[in-house]
Image (cartoon, coloured by chain):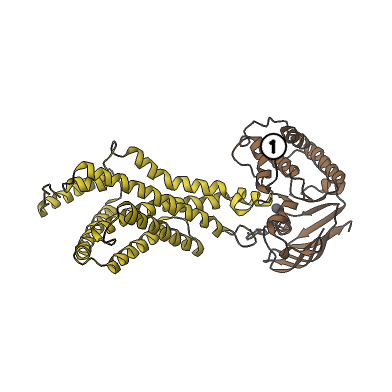
Chain colours: A brown, B yellow
Amino acid sequence: MYCLEGVKYRDILAIDSLCFPTNKITSVVGESGSGKTTLLRLLNKLISNDEGTILFNGTSLRDIDSILLRRKVVMLSQLPAIFPGSVKDNLLLGFTFADKPPVDDEKLYEALKMVHLSKELSGNAETLSGGEKQRLALARVILMEPDVFLLDEPSSALDDETEQLIIEKLVRHTRETGKTLIMVTHSKKVAREFSDVIIELKNGRVVGKEGV
Amino acid sequence: MGGQVIELQIYQLAAAYIFVLLLMVIVRIKGIHREKEIVIASIRMTLQLILTGYILVYLFENPHPALVILAIAVMLVFAVSNIIKRVKTPLSPKIKKVIALSMASGTLVSIIYFILVVINLSPWYEPRYFIPIAGMIIGNSMTGISLGVSRLVDGMNTQKNLVEAALMLGATPKAASKHIANNAFDSAIIPTINSMVGMGIVFLPGLMTGQILSGVSPVTAIEYQIAIMLGIVGSVSLTVIIFVELGYKTFFNHEHQLEL
Ligand SMILES: Nc1ncnc2c1ncn2[C@@H]1O[C@H](COP(=O)(O)OP(=O)(O)OP(=O)(O)O)[C@@H](O)[C@H]1O
Ligand SMILES: [Mg+2]
């Protein structure tokens, strides 16, 4: 799906060679400040590398329109982004932003169910708890049905049990629909249990690859 | 202009300054440390107005299109630098250019329309009309756009996360900053709308007051006031629309990435 060759970003990230396989679950782990978020931002083209190339399905990211790329490769930010308005407004915003036709309420509830969020669509999104906001933001990404999910610590604010349940569903969904999932996680357990590939970063360098 | 104008004598003006001195005594007693600002502002205002007075006398006696155009250019330069100074947050060179461009194009279009179509002034550069009207349009647009600039820049800085989250979902920069841009437009235009709503009831606007004081019939003064007010609303809207349309783009690069 993605291959990085000699990629440098400021003095934050330096990756000689790294590939993310298609239709697989890849976990990115590493201590705080090791460059995990920066890596995902590069893949989503929110930032561009100073040196080297990042290939997406064989084409350099430099030759791909950022907006079209981001509609295929949707990223979930580490801090959940909740806009003023209801739960439904927040879910539908994804469609507005991606310029896609919206779906009906039933589909929205399905997405909420997938992230174990039992809230009404009409409820105020801004008064949700931190973990609930995180799940709402995740549901919004799932509804976009992207080819690749780029999730930055999708379960960091959740208790172990909920984390386990949601990641399991997400992984199953990814496999069933033939998508690719790349997620940053702080949980060694989640990484071990669910991923095909584990990449470990330290000080902006790849120090471990498992499963490739 | 039929009415008799009471010329203010020097001692009458002095009385006005005494009023300010009284105010300063109160400010001092209250322990508000603003005497210096009040003194400086009063002196500055006096000097500026005296200077402006002489310049206006000269312009009125020597009406010439080049001089009028020069005067407008000077006003615009002052207005733009004033906007840049007033906004507390640092501004990028790109956005400064956008401010200058939107002020120049928005106010000039409004001034030209107003002078040529609404008032149908002849000769078009008659300084007695041209300069005060242009001044009001530029001054009000300056106030509006200052508010708009602050809101846009603050919004982009404080809501960086939301803007980027929208980009991550595939939003265009325009869609990602729409909230903030609309907000900037609102805050720029609201003072003008409020002043229209209160006009004639809560206060008598400056132009009208001035004309009435110099003996013009209140009805004529009101006609001018209505016309100029519409001109101001039009100009504020136009400058702010141009500013917001171009301004949000300065926060993004050609790869549609947020650059702060
Ligand atoms: N825009 C930036 N300007 C300067 N430094 C930055 C910027 N973005 C990230 N960094 C630095 O780069 C390093 C990597 O940051 P990054 O956010 O990628 O870490 P991370 O692995 O995601 O950490 P965490 O687990 O805490 O989220 C950090 O030291 C951070 O301070
Ligand atoms: Mg991070």
Q: Using a 10 Å C-alpha cutoff, classify the residue at mark 1 as few (fewer than 14 neighbours), some (14 to 19) or many (20 or more).
A: many
Q: Nearer the viewer, residue A87 or B174?
A: B174
Q: Chain of mark 1?
A: A
In the shown orientation, is residue A83 left or right of residue A69? left
Q: Position of residue B57 (x, y in %)?
A: 19, 62
Whether ligand 2 has any atom under 8 Å from the Cβ at mark 1 is answered as no
Q: Residue at x 28, y 62 (%)?
A: B125
Pick the front one: B86 or B109: B109
User: Does B114 sit above or below residue A116?
Assistant: below
Can residue B127 be seen here? The reply is: yes
Residue plotted at (21% across, 67% down): B62
**Quarter assignment of residue B83:** bottom left
The residue at the point 34 percent across, 54 percent down is B117
Q: Is residue B149 above or below residue B27?
A: below
Seen from the viewer's position, the closer of residues B202 and B86 is B202
A79 relative position to A148: left or right? left
The amino acid type, in three-letter code, at marker 1 is Glu
Q: Is residue B29 among the parts visible in the rendering?
A: no
At mark 1, the secondary structure is helix
How far from the left and from the top, in percent, is residue B129? Answer: 26, 56
Residue A103 picture location, percent across and down: 72, 38
State which quarter of the image contains the C terminus of chain B: bottom right
Residue of label 1: A132
* Residue A156 location, quadrant: top right
Q: How many marks are shown on the rendered structure?
A: 1
Q: Position of residue A43 (x, y in %)?
A: 74, 58
Q: Decide if residue B133 is on the left or right side of residue B88.
A: left
